[in-house]
Amino acid sequence: MARTGRIRRRSFACAALLVALAAPQGSSQDRRVVRVLAERFTFTPSQIKVKRGTVVEFRVRSDDTSHGFHIVGSNASVIVPKRGRGDATLIFEADAAGQYTFECSKMCGAGHSFMRGSIIVEE
Ligand SMILES: [Cu+2]
């Protein structure tokens, strides 16, 4: 008897869990995966709040052309491949409370310089 199976989407929750399990034992740091969608000329979400001490793993995906993802004031910068070519990963250690700006670092069109967002690190 044939049974119709459902096609399962790859489980993102599962991937996040593996990352959490991979964190060093005894580490007091929280690790969080934040998925960001880049498209002309916005990042979604554009505001991310985390607790101080969190290690944030950004996974940035484009919905159109290639973009950049750069945290202002740091060396942290990655190229986000164009749509369908996968994610770019960037690790941000939120060691100090405050507000950080991230921006597109690859010229992507007329609104490129408006393509930014913020990370708020709370005590
Ligand atoms: Cu850009």
Image (spheres, grey):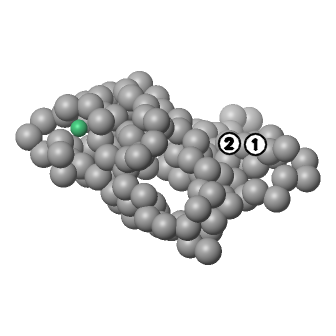
Q: Taking the image as four quarters, which one is ligand 1 found in? A: top left
Query: Label 2 crowding class (10 Å Cα cut-off): few <14, some 14-19, many 20+?
Result: few
How many marks can you see? 2
- Callout 1 crowding tier (Cα within 10 Å): few <14, some 14–19, many ≥20: few
Q: Which mark is residue 39?
A: none
The residue that disc 2 covers is 15
In this orientation, does residue 61 appear? Answer: no
Q: Position of residue 80 (x, y in %)?
A: 38, 32
Q: Which residue has dot 1 on it?
A: 18
| Residue 57 place in picture, x, y as percent | 59, 46
Above or below, 32 against 78 in this view is below
Query: Farthest bottom residue?
Result: 123
Q: Is mark 2 within 8 Å of ligand 1?
A: no
Q: What SS does tag 2 mark?
A: helix
Which quarter shows the N terminus?
A: top right
Proximity of marks 1 and 2: CB atoms separated by less than 8 Å: yes
For image coordinates 49% across by 67% down, the residue present is: 98
Q: In the rendered image, which quarter contains the C terminus? A: bottom right
Q: In the image, 46: left or right of 11?
A: left
